[in-house]
Image (cartoon, rainbow, N blue to C red):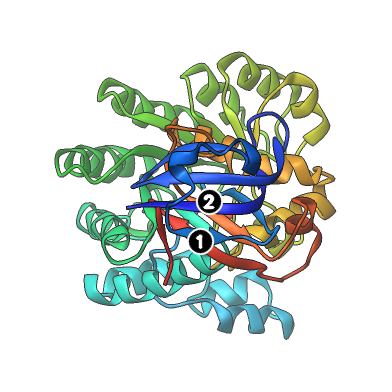
Amino acid sequence: MAILLSHATAATMTKGYGLIDDAAVVCDGAQILWVGQMYELPQTYRSLPEQDCQGRLVTPGLIDCHSHIVFGGHRAAEFEMRLNGASYEEVARAGGGILSTVTATRAASEADLLASALARADLMIAAGATTIEVKSGYGLTVLDELKMLRVARQIGEHRPVQVQTTHLAAHAIPPEYKENPDAYIDQVAIPSLHAAYAEELIDTVDAFCEGIAFSPAQVQRLFDVARAMGLQIKLHAEQLSDLKGAVLAANMGALSCDHVEYIGPDGVEAMARAGSVAVILPGAFYTLRETQMPPIAAFRAAGVPMAVATDFNPGSSPVASLPLAMNMACTLFRMTPLEALQGTTTHAARALGLTDRGQIAPGLRADLCIWDATHPAELSYRIGATPLHARIFGGQIDA
Ligand code: DI6
Ligand code: FE
């Protein structure tokens, strides 16, 4: 069914904000058919069922290109322990940290994981997301990684949101492989990649390249397999130190390098050459009280597109709201409100390898947000507000 959004302030994101005052957007089924000024609206569209936006801002539906919303349990108890003075080691000894999430995820049934993931997806949707990327990485056995990916795939069957799934078995080294991460790559990461691919459970492949996780050589072995399968890659790179993961990933044609607080000039240059997107994740920076900022000015100067995402996860970024992540990107990292909105629309689409969304233009997906705002900078300016007025997903307005 076709609908007409009338009297909108449209931020088409086609060139800068691509603002159109008193705009009309025509959606035909799941596609955008026409966008322009009201007075130019062809006569044939004037009789369509109309949603009068009354001057409200309309943007492309927001795209969260980096999240980990499938997991068991949560980590509020360790958050409280730390604030009561417990050391990192005491938290770990009490069963806290990422491995506590692995234990809880392994113990959870597919139905339980789905129920909690849907509740998190609802928060993301309520803040304006229409596409979300969801990673595995808390199972760390072949079966548990597949379980996570099946749950991730099901989210989109239960909610009006498109889900892109990412294989992230190389997220952490489980206790049983503590002394032998190479064996983990061979016995879990690569076999689960083959199995997930065979079940058509994955769109992209990711890894965590860090001193506390996997080395560039281990990441490369996994990515060689992924590339041979024709899968696109992305990497958690340079979050806590500069292991040159971004250089490696960019040279292998990565869609994105994510976090990148500690990236050096060589990494920025490699990303610019490869056209990789820098995915900026201020929620983790904030939660971990990091001080090393990603080199926003260097990315800007080199023409590296920047995306902004929530990194929603139970440990380092328990945040579901893209507008809040945009606010943090501006205030903590000095990104501009335009960059922040590009980061959750056009550049986020690119970080996922999606060419059919992220802007308001004929032929693209009819995923749109109508905001209780009149200028796009308001989305980044407000703190913790959810100014979403209505959302359109695949041409359907949310009930
Ligand atoms: N970087 C992070 O900040 C999260 N994963 C990653 O690779 C942390 C995940 C967690 O603590 O549960
Ligand atoms: Fe992450």
User: What's the residue at 48%, 77% (across, down)?
Assistant: 74
Task: Name the one closer to the observer, 12 or 125.
Answer: 12
> Tag 1: Cα neighbours inside 10 Å, few (<14), some, or many (≥20)?
many
Mark 1 / mark 2, whichever is N-terminal: 2
Q: Quadrant of the C terminus?
A: bottom left
Q: Which residue is mark 1?
A: 391
User: What's the residue at 53%, 39% (across, down)?
Assistant: 358
Query: Can residue 362 be spotted in the picture?
Result: yes
Instruction: Residue 60: give x, y in percent of width and height.
Output: 56, 46
In the displayed structure, would residue 389 be above or below residue 95?
Answer: above
Viewed as shown, does residue 371 lie left or right of 181?
Answer: right
Instruction: Residue 44: give x, y in percent of width and height.
Output: 43, 40
In the displayed structure, would residue 109 be above or below residue 288?
Answer: below
In the displayed structure, would residue 163 be above or below residue 104?
Answer: above
Instruction: Residue 338: give x, y in percent of width and height.
Output: 76, 41
Marker count (numbered): 2
Task: Name the one closer to the observer, 196 or 288.
Answer: 196
The secondary element bearing badge 1 is classed as strand
Classify residue 194 by image quadrant: top left
Instruction: Residue 355: give x, y in percent of width and height.
Output: 45, 30
> Tag 2: Cα neighbours inside 10 Å, few (<14), some, or many (≥20)?
many
Viewed as shown, does residue 143 lie left or right of 234?
Answer: left
- The mark found on residue 61 in the picture is 2
Query: Can residue 240 be spotted in the picture?
Result: no
The secondary element bearing badge 2 is classed as loop
Viewed as shown, does residue 224 lie left or right of 390?
Answer: left
Amino acid at circle 1: Arg
Q: Are marks 1 and 2 in contact (CB under 8 Å)?
A: yes
Amino acid at circle 2: Gly
Classify residue 84 by image quadrant: bottom right
Task: Name the one closer to the observer, 12 or 146.
Answer: 12
